[in-house]
Image: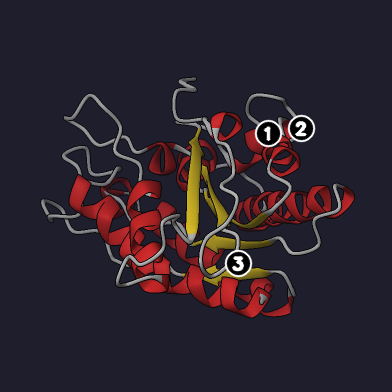
Amino acid sequence: EDKKDFDYADKTPPSGNQSGKPRFIFCYGDSLTFGISPPAKDPYPYAPRLEKELNHLYDPDKSSKIPPTIVQHFGLPGWTANMMLDHISDENTGVCSIVRRIPNLEVVIILVGTNDLGKTAGADKDIPGIIVKHIEDLHEQALDCAKDAGNKKLQTLMVGIPGSDYQEHVTQASELASTINDLLKEYATISPKTTYADFPFSFEKGGENWAVDGLHLSKDGYDALAEALAPRVKTILDDID
């Protein structure tokens, strides 16, 4: 996998700003976090736009010399939630490694599940339950790793599985995604440190938010995702205070 966006180790935390120390957020997931957007060759992750939106919410007049929030990201194209679990402590790809390396991390946003639909559709198992358990475990282990590292503030935000052209043509996949999202939403109501957010817009073939492959987002779509998530992340940060 391409690791060029996995740059959290290269960041030096600022010493602080007028309102205190900056807040650290990390976006983790599959190709939708990496920012694949055909036909463009270069990725266009939503994390930089999320950082911009959050900094505007916290400092609309840009009066602070140091940004109030820093948002970093790592996307693993093609990976399922189960694959992320299998590598949870891997030095290069694991979310636990990320949590340990950023001791003041406050929010991890996990967007995963799209690849799970394609790899499991049609199997004779309790597929919704299995996928949901993998995603829940990903959040729980990230939180446990933070706690073990002395970080008691960390919260996670789980983003629902978005629509796609694939789901438009495979009814089973669409129903599976809907069931999984409902179960994740229910889980978040009883988890004290995990918040659920529906994916902010529906699939529209040829729509401005979607790439030509009908699976990934356009640049406008990644921007729209960031704009929708920003107030949700700010609410979590404000509650941590």
Residue drawn 67% across and 58% down?
A: 129
Residue designated by label 2: 89
Calculate the distance from the C-alpha at mark 1 to the C-alpha at mark 3.
Answer: 21 Å
Tell me the element at label 1.
Answer: loop
Residue type at mark 3 is: Leu
Residue designated by label 3: 184
Point out the tag, 1 or 3, that comes first from the N-terminus: 1
Residue 227, quarter of the rendered image:
bottom left
Residue designated by label 1: 94
At label 1, counting other C-alpha atoms closer than 10 Å, the crowd grade (few under 14, some 14-19, many 20 or more) is some
Residue type at mark 1 is: Gly
Q: Nearer the viewer, residue 236 or 197?
A: 236
Residue 95: image location, x then y, percent: 67, 40
Q: Nearer the viewer, residue 77 or 157?
A: 157
Residue 45: image location, x then y, percent: 35, 42
Residue type at mark 2 is: Ser
Q: Quadrant of the C terminus?
A: bottom right
Callouts 1 and 2 close, C-beta under 8 Å: yes
At label 2, counting other C-alpha atoms closer than 10 Å, the crowd grade (few under 14, some 14-19, many 20 or more) is some
Q: Is residue 76 above or below residue 51?
A: above
Residue 93, quarter of the rendered image:
top right
Calculate the distance from the C-alpha at mark 1 to the C-alpha at mark 2.
Answer: 5 Å
